[in-house]
Each structure stands twice: as C-alpha cells, then as structure tokens.
Image (tube, rainbow, N blue to C red):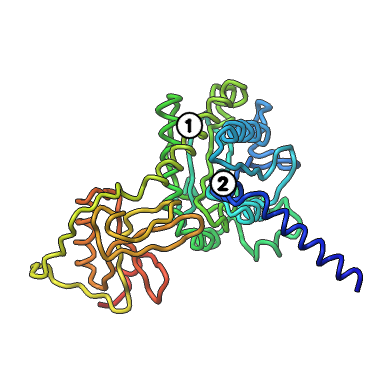
Amino acid sequence: MQTTVKHIIVFVVITFITSLTGISSLQAQDDKFVVVLDAGHGGHDPGRPTKNGYKEKDIALKIVLQIGKELEKNPDFKVIYTRKTDVFVTLKNRAKIANKADADLFVSVHCNAHHTQAFGTETYVLGAKNSERNMAVAKAENEVIFLEEDYEENYAGFDPSSPESSIAIGIEQEVYVEQSIVLARKVEDNFSGKLKRRSRGIKQLSLWVLHNTYMPSVLIETGFITNKKEGAYLNSSSGQVKVAGAITDAIIAYKKELDQNVGNSILISDTEIDENSETTPDIYEGVTFKVQIAASSRNLDAKPYNFKGLSNLSKEKAGALYKYFYGSTSDYNEARQLNEKAKEKGYTTSFLVAYKDGKQTDINEVLKTTTN
C-alpha cells in the first residue's frame, strides 16, 4: 500500500514539474525537422572491397558526421544517427531507428565500387523497376543481410538475388517515393552544379535499407572508391567536407520547399470545368481519381484561400507529410482536365493519383487492368 502511495506521489510531482517546463518549449522541440543519418556498413562489414585500402564504412561515417555537425547548427533540425562509431547495425534496425524517431527524412550514405574505373555520383530511391545494372547494385547492397544473425527469421525468406523479393519490398514505401525523388534531385544537382562532379543521376532500387522506413528516404552513392582519382577525393578530409556540404544544402533546401509548397494564400475565383466539354467520359467503376497538387510538412486547411482559389480540396496525412488533393472523380478524362487546371493555377508539378477500395493504388495498373 505504501509503495502504491509513493508511486502516486511521484507521478503527481513529475506531472507538476513537466507543466512548469513550458508548453512553448515542448512545442518547439516537436516542430523540429527530424533527419536520420545512416552511415552505410560498419563493424565487421567494411562495405565494398577495394585494392587501394579505402574503406567504405569509414568514409561514409565521416561524411555523415560532417552532415550532422552542420545540420545541428540549425535550430530547425534534429539529427539522429544510426551509428556514430565503427559498429555493425542491421538493416532492419536502421529502419527501426528512423521509424521510432518519427523522422521526416532518412538519408543513407555509401560509396560505390566497380571493377572498372567508373566514376560519378548516384542517388537512389526505393522502387521495383530495376535495370540490369540497378539490380546488380541492389543485390550487392542487400547481401549484407547474410552477415546478420537470424537473417532468415528477420527478413522472412527475402532473397537478395531474387527480382521478386526486390519488387515486394518496394510496395509499402511507394507513398513516399515522390518526395524522395525531390530530395534526390537536389542532392544530385548539388553534386554536379556546386561540386562540378559527374552525376550518374537518380535511380530506383529495391534496397532493404530503405524498406520499412515510413518517410521519404534516399541512399546516396557519393562516388566510386575503386576509381583512382575519385577514391582519393572521397578519402580526403577536403572531399568529405565538400560532399557533406552538398548533401546538407540539399536537405535544407528540401525542407524549405516542403514548408512553402502549398500555394501563396491568394484567393482567386474558381471557374468550374465546362460541363459542355466535348470530351467523352471515361468512367472507371470503383476507382476515384484525384490531382495531387502539393505535399508539405505544414498542416493547412483544405480551403480555396490556401490553394490559389481551387475548390473541392482534400488532404491526407502520410507520415510526417500532408498531401493535398484537388478534385475527386471516377471519370479519367475529367481528372485529366482537373490536372490541367491545377497546372494553369501554378501547380506545375501536379499529377493524378488513383484510389481503389479507399486505398491509393498504382494509377498505371488501374488504367491497364480496370474494365471501364
């Protein structure tokens, strides 16, 4: 009985002290943009083998720590690391760390390798459509699974060499791919523009390190450590600082775009689509088409004054993001007209999405398989 009373007293005291910390300070912490930085490999997993003695795990860690150091100077950001030392972290736990933190971004840093003198940067987002080259990279990155204990239990029979397994892991993260591509483009643009390095582009890849991270996620191949010149660059302090700076700037620009990507709050009268349009209706039973006009970390009312006068608006929370939609129709041709109108209003990156049985689905599959 006395123990119970003590517990109650402790609870009351803690509650009282917490109330004195100030709602504003707690709110400020909640408002921080959470970035999980993931240094690839580590511990008994050195990463890609090289003949020049460079270790991917060491280079990736140094770059990640530099990114974190710069981001932590900005009060708007909170940085969480999957590792800060030379330790082995399972792929499953990397995703778990990000999800537990309810992160806004997951950024995994790696170095590439090849038997030739290939060079250049690549940034990957999760996807099922892999070229032969991409599939080879996916297999190499995923095979770290075999270094883990109980991998068969943890990964439910996932086979890194199987295209079917790779396709399966892409489905759950599909909702975040669009935003992942936005960040990936900024990273690659900085590599080619600011650092004058060769960018090999943005690619989609089925990677376990991105699987189950329920937020926009990218894997950055910062260059080829097997290339004589690029390897030396990545292994140098100067090169690491420059690469980290390019990635840091991309993350900051990405957040800024999210904060602003919801229109200019200018009320413009909405003109309905001409009901006498000659376009023939193209009805898909059981399917609802919408126009996604924005995705942002800001939670705004789905009202015309927030979206350049557009009406018939809706929003949906996806992780830390809010997605905003214009229109709702089973007529594919009407949806296309709505998309054109959104573009005319200034939403130049708007696009169509499809819902079936209340869940977002691949619009290309709908158009191919749905009988209308």
Q: Give the mark, 1 or 2, whose residue is nearer the N terminus.
A: 2
How many numbered marks, from 0 up? 2
Q: Is residue 242 left or right of residue 199?
A: right
Name the residue beneath numbered marker 1: 120
Residue extending furthest right?
2
Residue 326 image point, x, y percent: 29, 62
User: Residue placed at 56% from the left, 23% from the top?
Assistant: 239
Q: Is residue 56 above or below residue 146?
A: above
The answer to whether residue 140 is visible is: no
Residue 94 or residue 113, whichever sits in front: 94
User: Image quadrant of residue 293?
Assistant: bottom left
Residue 44 or residue 21, whichever sits in front: 21
The Cα–Cα distance between marks 1 and 2, rounded to whole angstroms, is: 39 Å
Residue 178 image point, x, y percent: 41, 52
Residue 22 image point, x, y percent: 63, 49
Q: Residues within 10 Å of mark 1 (few under 14, many from 20)?
A: some
User: Residue placed at 71% from the left, 65% from the top?
Assistant: 153
Identify the amino acid type marked 1: Gly
Q: Is residue 91 left or right of residue 149?
A: left
Instruction: Identify the disc placed on residue 28.
Output: 2
Residue 259 image point, x, y percent: 42, 46
Q: Quadrant of the C terminus?
A: bottom left
User: Residue placed at 37% from the left, 74% from the top?
Assistant: 356
Q: Nearer the viewer, mark 1 or mark 2?
A: 2
